[in-house]
Amino acid sequence: MSIESTPAQVDIDASQKWMTDFYASLDSKDLVKFADSYLTPDVEFNFANMPSLKGRDSVVSVFGASKDAISSMKHEITECKVLQDSVMAATTLSWTFVDGSDAMMKAWAILRKEPKDKQATSYSIYGDFAPLYAAVARLSGPSTQH
């Protein structure tokens, strides 16, 4: 069994800043810029209970599905853990939707990257996204296509 060493404080500080910048970029809703800046081209993406996806385009596609319903969003980091090969963050996520309604939830993200890395090779998100799905469904309304 190997025991991983604790990252140096300078690496912890840099990784925590990286996470703050990561969420600020995501909250800007410029999904292509976000993905290009923080994720490797072949990133492995795990979102809730969906099957694992590959590539930046998958991240943009999953997040883009709700983009038009969201007026603004804000991730507040409530806890951040830095390991040698990953960064984990607990967040409170708040949305304001285009109809003026609001929703909030808690989630965990795990990103595989060493402190020196600028981009993550794996991005996993865990949480109950029911508030988001309900708002998107409500704002999409009934389908009129036959």
Image: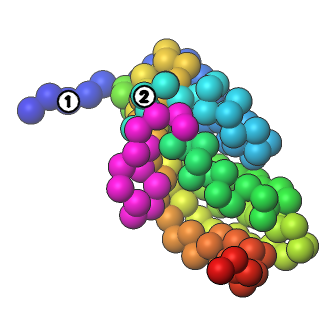
On-image quarter of the C terminus: bottom right
Give above or below for 84 relative to 126: above
The residue most toward the top is 116
Q: Which residue is mark 1?
A: 3
Q: Identify the residue shown where x is 35% and y is 56%.
A: 51
Q: Tell whether 121 sits left or right of 57.
A: left
Residue ID for mark 2: 42
| Residue for point 70% across, 72% down | 136
Please state if 142 lies on the left or on the right of 123 as rendered.
right
In which quadrant of the rendered view does residue 16 lie? Answer: top right
Q: Residues within 10 Å of mark 1 (few under 14, many from 20)?
A: few
Q: Position of residue 59 (x, y in %)?
A: 55, 43
Q: Position of residue 124 (x, y in %)?
A: 44, 48
Residue 140 at what x, y percent from top left?
Answer: 74, 74
Which quadrant would residue 70 be assigned to in this image?
Answer: bottom right
Q: Earlier in the sequence, mark 1 or mark 2?
A: 1
Q: Is residue 80 magenta?
A: no
> Residue type at mark 1?
Ile
Q: Which residues, given as a range, are shown in magenta?
A: 45-57
Residue 17 vs 80, above or below: the answer is above
Label 2 crowd (10 A; few <14 / some 14-19 / many >=20):
some
Q: Which SS class for mark 1?
A: loop
Please state which of the two labelled residues, at mark 1 or mark 2, is closer to the viewer.
2
Decide if residue 31 is in sight here: yes
Whether residue 24 is visible to the viewer of this picture, yes or no, is: no
